[in-house]
Image (cartoon, coloured by chain):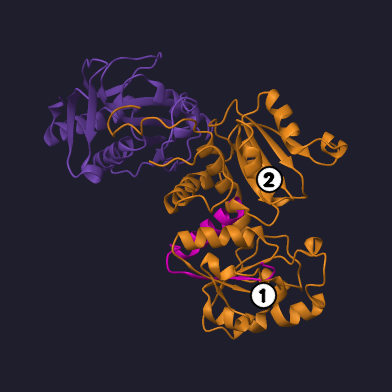
Chain colours: A orange, B purple
Amino acid sequence: MTGLGKDLVGLEPLSAEQIRLILDTAEPFKEVSERAIKKVPALRGKTIVNLFFEASTRTRISFEFAEKRLSADSVNVAASGSSVSKGETLVDTAKNLEAMRIDMVVIRHGASGAAQFLGQRIASNVINAGDGKHEHPTQALLDLLTLRDRFGRIEGLKIAICGDVLHSRVARSNIWGLTKLGAQVAVCGPATLMPRDIESLGVTVIPRIEDAIAWADALNVLRLQLERMTAGFIPSLREYNRVFGVTSERLARAPKELLILHPGPMNRGVEIDSDVADGPHAVILPQVTNGVAVRMAVLYLLAGGAPGPGQAMGGEER
Amino acid sequence: MTTRTPLLDETAIARALARMGSEIVERCGGTDGLALVGIQRRGVELAYRLKRIIDRAEHDNIPCGKLDITLYRDDLQTIGPRPVVGETQLPDLEGRTVVIVDDVLYTGRTVRAALDECADFGRPRRVLLCVLIDRGGRELPIQADIVGKVMTVAPDERVDVFVSELDGRDAVELVRGP
């Protein structure tokens, strides 16, 4: 049986088998969140720090629920209001937290590679909750779980990732996860928001949104990351919506019905229209529900400690 | 060298389960408010077999569920990699007589975990423990109410239970050696 190692930095270093292990482990955790008492004692006594250097609602709350439902003790540290604002370095902050005997750090940071950098320098488990434009592995895992729920498989699916691919760590993690599990991936968006050499990741570029819609089984619509745009990448939001927006008119012309994913938060009327986001084919809220289960699975698997003998054979009490 | 000694064959298991089924009904004074809960994995198959035996004899349809105790184990900090977590699917336990079903009773730690997990789902009126094999070696003050077969097994020996639904055959074997 394969473990996950010490840290979850991204999906790039993981094998298909490890990704499947996380998805399979997430299944029973879905049920825990449906119980009247939404709590199991699996991580009792573990201390987890949620270290968020960037704004986040969904991911931070989702991690917090996952931690609480596993009975871990967690503390939230935001960059503003902490000694980070006094100029303390990332490693110093983490080492100080570690001196208080923590077990895990969930980190979101604006710099690509921050999670890996930290993981190499502290003994606690590190989980990447989004680092710059690099990866956002738990978001891709919940997207994979949602796709697998709806289609029963990932292999052979055609997934189009649309919009601001350049700034998107969600896109990168999705590309790694989907291609490792045998899906076909296309990216679609304005040339200014398309990274150079994106094809080297094993994806096809489809320049027109109409063609992407005609090709795909599911669309993962990315958020236009206006806060990261320092230069004029698009002429205007209205023009973006007119050329690349996922609208019900465009979807109506597709040969088949498409599943619509969005990592949130949505810019309604920009990359996605409200009637699509609230329509019958959107799985945006099931994605959020799956997020808690996937994060519980990751926390649970990483807390596993050193590899030892596998599960006892059937019959014998373990 | 590993040696396997047969303890129960298909017929012996069927006879034991038939008796255990009637014992459950007898001890509970009927099937009113009765619920069976099997512990993953082979306890689940045994619970569903007991359900069929009781349903047939009593012309009833008693609720039956499955319980995975992995997340309630007391050794999660020391074992690894984590075993795969199975499905938990329980009927309403509130106010019922719940019979926990497992294949082998050994240290009692699995049953302790099962009791804790059941308590998070509701408050049964009464809980009974029903096992196919009681091999002794308890580490906690837990005993079974309904037992298929009691035997003394040394700590370095193992009891393997096979059920046809999962293993293609019904058997109980004593395993010596690595």
Identify the magenta region.
A138-165
Residue A290 bears which disc, if any? none
Report the residue marked by disc 1.
A189
- Answer whether residue B170 is magenta in the image: no
The C terminus of chain A lies in which quarter of the figure?
A: top left
Q: Is residue A219 visible?
A: no
Which residue is the extreme one toward the bottom? A253
Q: Secondary structure at mark 1?
A: loop
Q: Quadrant of residue A82?
A: top right
Check residue A114 in the rendering and tell me which mark sits there, or answer none: 2
Q: Amino acid at mark 2?
A: Ala
What residue appears at the point 70 percent right and 68 percent down from the top-left corner?
Answer: A164
In-front residue for pair A296/A39 = A296
- Which of B43/A165 is in front? A165
Image quadrant where one finds the N terminus of chain A: top left
What is the x, y in percent for residue B96? Answer: 45, 33
